Amino acid sequence: MGIVLVTGASAGFGEAIARKLVSLGHTVIGAARRTDRLSALKDELGTNFFPLAMDVSDQASTDAAFEIIDRQFPHIDLLVNNAGLALGVSPAHQSNMADWERMIATNVTGLARVTHKVLPGMVERDAGQIINLGSIAGVYAYPGGNVYGGTKAFVKQFTLNLRADLAGSRIRVTDIEPGLCGGTEFSVVRLDGDADKAAAVYQGVQPLTAQDIADTVAWIAGLPAHVNVNTIELMPVAQTFAGLKVTRDA
């Protein structure tokens, strides 16, 4: 059993991943901005869950969190870069620049920042694993995806480039790319808190769940040490990559 750092652990995928890995006997450092939710999770999961305040989009917050990690844990065996968000569905020319900057700060800079903190120790030990939460939005373009899709394309290529840099080492790196996934705050956040619009996204569809993603993380982490999953793409049966839109003249 190992020591796992999960970012964005206060809700959604991160919370489900933390629950799953604790249930398997791992020690999970659950990092997030919302410490009240982390405290509640600590009360539920017990001593194998360590709540940690961290805003990956903020350098000072990340530095302070890693000072605590370095004092209290000998190393990180598995990093799950889960913290991320989507904001807005407007076309690019109507989008809010502040939303673009926040997505880049979290999904790109934050993920890179945490990876940069953890990776040297893994290389020194020649052991460790990184699982990044990407998205099919980084592979398939769709209207309104603009910067969100761009950030997830970064996650995909960054993951593959890490594997290239780490050739010859025993460090494994994976990009998980989920499609339509319900039961989380993702769409509510993206649609500026409009719960009705968010519910409509999943109406009449059985989407993926956070538990599906947590089970996938656990499966990848539990594979033999010689097996690296480069990229894994998941969609609900109701969704397909084959629906590329064609706009025709009237």
Image (tube, rainbow, N blue to C red):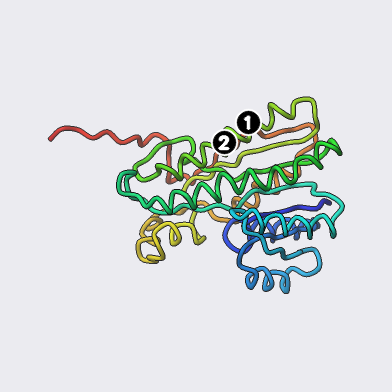
- The residue that disc 2 covers is 156
Residue depicted at x 49% and y 38% = 138
Q: Quadrant of residue 21?
A: bottom right
Residue 73: x %, y % from top left = 84, 56
In-image side of 65 versus 156 (left or right):
right
Tag 2–tag 1 contact (CB < 8 Å): yes
Residue depicted at x 59% and y 63% = 11
Residue 127: x %, y % from top left = 83, 38
Residue at the left extreme, as displayed? 250
Q: Estimate how packed mark 2 is, as few (under 14), some (14 to 19) or many (20 or more) residues with alpha carbons within 10 Å.
A: many
Q: Quadrant of residue 130?
A: top right
Tell me which amino acid carries mark 2: Lys
Q: Above or below — where is 43 with respect to 204?
A: below
In-image side of 34 versus 171 (left or right):
left
Residue 247: x %, y % from top left = 23, 35
- The residue that disc 1 covers is 160
Q: Does dot 2 land on a helix, a strand or a loop? A: helix
CA gap between label 2 and label 1 equals: 7 Å
Residue 6: x %, y % from top left = 69, 54
Residue depicted at x 74% and y 59% = 29
Q: Nearer the viewer, residue 151 or 13?
A: 151
